[in-house]
Amino acid sequence: MLPIGLSALELRNIVECAFLPLHCTCSTADNATLSVDISDPQTGKVHLLKTGIAPERLASSRGICNLIAELRTELTAEQAALVEPVTHAQRQVRYA
């Protein structure tokens, strides 16, 4: 049971549903830390793997929201790094 009265299953459901339609899997390690694996449901390509998340961070609904926001930020940054930057001239040609 987590400090805010949620079971590990309830916490997993909250975090995993926050990243739909991507495939998100939460698991607990032997040392009670949380791991989150976010991948593409069709290709299985891992977009983000975050390990060692301390359960103390999840002591409130705000902590859970902050974790989800942090993971979304990292996921967005990771996906942006994979996209080739488009110059202003290329953008104008594309829409001309």
Image (cartoon, rainbow, N blue to C red):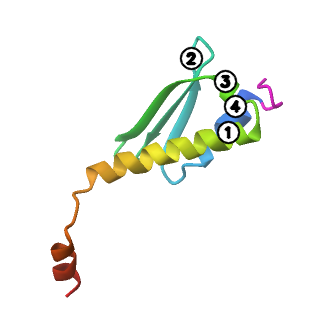
Q: Which residues are magenta?
A: 1-6
Q: Decide if residue 60 is in sight here.
A: yes
Do the CB atoms of the residues marked 2 and 3 lie less than 8 Å apart? no
How far from the left and from the top, in percent, is residue 23? Answer: 49, 44
Do the CB atoms of the residues marked 1 and 4 lie less than 8 Å apart? yes
Residue extending farthest front: 88
Do the CB atoms of the residues marked 2 and 4 lie less than 8 Å apart? no
* Residue 85 in magenta stretch: no
How far from the left and from the top, in percent, is residue 2? Answer: 76, 25
The answer to which of 30 and 51 lies nearer the viewer is: 51
Residue in the picture at 44% in, 43% down = 74
Mark nearer the N terminus (2 vs 4): 2
Q: Amino acid at mark 4?
A: Leu
Q: For numbered disc 3, what is the local secondary structure?
A: helix
* Residue 3 in magenta stretch: yes
Query: What residue is shown with label 1?
Result: 64
Residue 58 is labelled as 4
Residue 27 is labelled as none
Instruction: Answer left or right for 48 relative to 20.
Output: left
CA gap between label 4 and label 3 equals 5 Å
Q: Amino acid at mark 3?
A: Pro
